[in-house]
Amino acid sequence: EDKVVQSPLSLVVHEGDTVTLNCSYEVTNFRSLLWYKQEKKAPTFLFMLTSSGIEKKSGRLSSILDKKELSSILNITATQTGDSAIYLCAVSTQGGSEKLVFGKGTKLTVNP
Amino acid sequence: NAGVMQNPRHLVRRRGQEARLRCSPMKGHSHVYWYRQLPEEGLKFMVYLQKENIIDESGMPKERFSAEFPKEGPSILRIQQVVRGDSAAYFCASSPLRGNNEKLFFGSGTQLSVL
């Protein structure tokens, strides 16, 4: 069965800290890995990664995929209280099912 | 351009009642996905629909759950004879293209509480 595991499950930091969130996966026919931010309720799209070693960047957030290690990291530098959210990692597969397989998420709390 | 609209935001039902959750996709999107999020769990795929067609229902429980996406109107997720274990957040997402589950736009979800 396809599986996505995120770590840590929760993290508390102070404003200005840098955090690294981890995602590992075991799936057949990998197509892409996605990161979402879930605050309040609706998950919002952050990144989609398909190629190993190419960093995607958006402001203070960046992410990279390692297909050899079957994993990805999401980095947030100079954290702000507005970064407090649950960060979800999901994997898409090729052929057959249309579903995304999600991890349980990492709950990030940034204290002032 | 309104996003994905789900209603109600909160729904309380007693055991044995029916729950109907509605999802209006983004304008121009004809593909709808339903996901369920149990407490402390990730989102779990339930069903993928196109207008008037169920494309993939591999995540739907075999009994009491059904989904539709009619030619006109919102997509409906229906849960008959609800039990406490159905309490969860139910999210709808939409996409403009088939097989484009990577570019999903999520609604804010319906929180179902079964008493």
Image (tube, coloured by chain):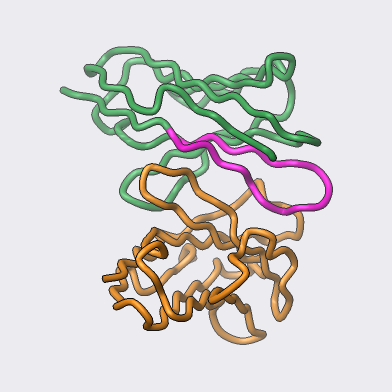
Chain colours: A green, B orange
Q: Residue at the right extreme?
A: A95
**Residue B14 lies in quadrant:** bottom left
In this view, the residue in front, B43 or A47, is B43
In this view, the residue in front, B9 or A55, is B9
State whether residue A58 is above or below residue A77.
below
Verify whether residue A102 appears in magenta: yes
* Residue drawn at 50 percent across, 56 percent down: B106
Q: For the C terminus of chain B, which image quadrant?
A: bottom left
Where in the figure is residue A39, as x and y percent of width and height? 34, 44
Where in the figure is residue B99, as x and y percent of width and height? 76, 54
Which stretch appears magenta? Answer: A88-105
Where in the figure is residue B112, as x and y percent of width and height? 35, 67
Q: Residue at the left extreme?
A: A112
Left or right of A77 in this view: A54: right
* Residue drawn at 28 percent across, 74 percent down: B12
* Residue drawn at 69 percent across, 77 percent down: B51
**Residue A80 lies in quadrant:** top left
State whether residue A70 is above or below residue A82.
above
Left or right of B75 in this view: B114: left
In this view, the residue in front, A36 or B10, is B10
Verify whether residue A5 appears in magenta: no
Where in the figure is residue A88, as x and y percent of width and height? 48, 37
Left or right of A57 in this view: A7: left
State whether residue A74 is above or below residue B6.
above
* Residue drawn at 74 percent across, 24 percent down: A51
Give the number of marks. Answer: 0
